[in-house]
Amino acid sequence: MIKTLKLIFVSYWLILFVGWLYIFTQNKENTDASYLFGALYALIALAGSLLGFFYIARGWGGFSSSVGKAVSFLSLGLFGLAFGQLVWSYFNIVAKIEIPYPSIADFGYFSIVPFYGISMLILTKVGGGKVTLGQARNKLLAVVVPALFLLGSYLVFLKGIEVDFSNPIRTFLDFGQPLGEAIVISIAIMTWQLSNKLLGGVMRSKIFFILFALVFQFITDFLFYYRNARGLYANGDVVDLFYSISFTLMAIALLNLSSQSFSKKSDEQRSVEEQV
Amino acid sequence: MDENAQNPQDAAAANTPAVDIHALFDQIAEKIIEQQESIIGPVAVEQAKRVKELKIDWPQHDVDISGSPQAAIDALVAQYKELFGQIAVETCKEAVSRLTSQLTPDQLPSSLK
């Protein structure tokens, strides 16, 4: 079943990709076709988050276990992205606003900072980060990596942006989103660094795939901030293609974590071993 | 010298309550499953049930080992290692360190050394 679901997600994305090629080659950015593209790829995040929360996380005991909690928070983050994207599409299609920023959509987009952040902290613990953090080199990395990302985010996205107290939500989002995401991406990189030595087994590749999906998500977000700040962003441009890939990657990362697929694999391995 | 007087070491041994090795290994297995359950939920019990030497009634938190207790613990730890690698072994060791301190080095399962 998991294989079939993954195939459905990839096939759906491929169809969307063909649609995006049409938008891109025919210069249809900021038209109804690009708005529709935005709404359709949001469905990947919506389906992925619901499957993650109600099906995958449940297999790990939901909020009663560490892995269950990590999957639940990742699913909530993906749901936040789906919410943000669907609201953005509503503003595009119904309210006829090209770039609805700031808007209620940003609550959804911003939700990945706490949700993905909590999930990463849990995965760091599960992956043995607590053990390896004791080493002096890793302690240093835990300070240097976030500091570098915060400095980089400030220099690229925030330098020159003025604090506007008359528009506190916009100011909060202008600063909070890139800085918050810089912190989460630092935690993701730290998770990889700290877990690399001790984390193994079947879960290693699955957890590292989540980290990859997460890094891709944040590269996409940073690309959006960069282009939007310079007035280069248009609905349906390359940033939206990147978002569609990010959502698909995270949906597949969640499906990879299905405890059922693992149990089945284990049973198959055991029966082969018994036959040998 | 009084012939009835005890050697001090023998006296200490006599005062130390005898450790029920079988019950201790049952506790070690239970503690490992419990610890793994906090990480991977019901999958921990599912994995433990694959170990032939373990008889598990998890709603009662009752674990009974049949056969070699060391082999049973090694097989249990190996199940979790298959999932998470060396970190699972370290977590198991940490979870049962208080219990394994009651075992002699030759009684300790190789996976927990």
Image: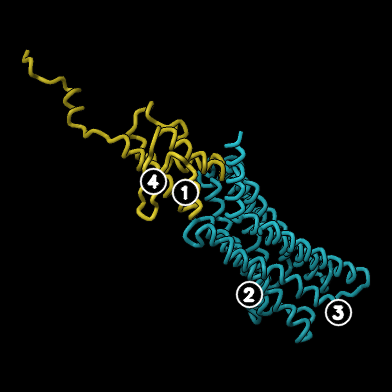
Cα separation between marks 2 and 1: 35 Å
Q: Mark 2 highlights which residue?
A: A107
Q: Mark 1 highlights which residue?
A: B36
| Residue at mark 2: chain | A
SS category of the residue bearing label 1? helix
Whether B46 is drawn above or below B10: the answer is below
Q: Which chain is yellow?
A: B
Q: Residue at x 64, y 73 (%)?
A: A108
Which numbered disc covers residue A31?
3
Chain A is shown in which shade? cyan
Give the number of callouts: 4
SS category of the residue bearing label 3? loop
Task: Give percent across and percent down for residue B47.
Answer: 50, 47
| Residue at mark 3: chain | A
The amino acid sitting under disc 3 is Thr
**Neighbourhood count class around disc 4 (C-alpha, 10 Å): few under 14, some 14–19, many 20 upward:** many
The amino acid sitting under disc 1 is Gln
SS category of the residue bearing label 4? helix
Asked if badges 4 and 2 are on one and the same chain, I answer no
Indicate the quadrant where residue A38 lies. Answer: bottom right
Asked if badges 3 and 2 are on one and the same chain, I answer yes
Q: Residue furthest right?
A: A26
Task: Give percent across and percent down for residue A67.
Answer: 54, 55
Front of the two marks 4 and 3: 4
Q: Residue furthest left?
A: B2
Which numbered disc covers residue A75?
none
Asked if badges 4 and 1 are on one and the same chain, I answer yes
Marks 2 and 1 in Cβ contact (< 8 Å): no
The reply to whether residue A187 is in sight is no
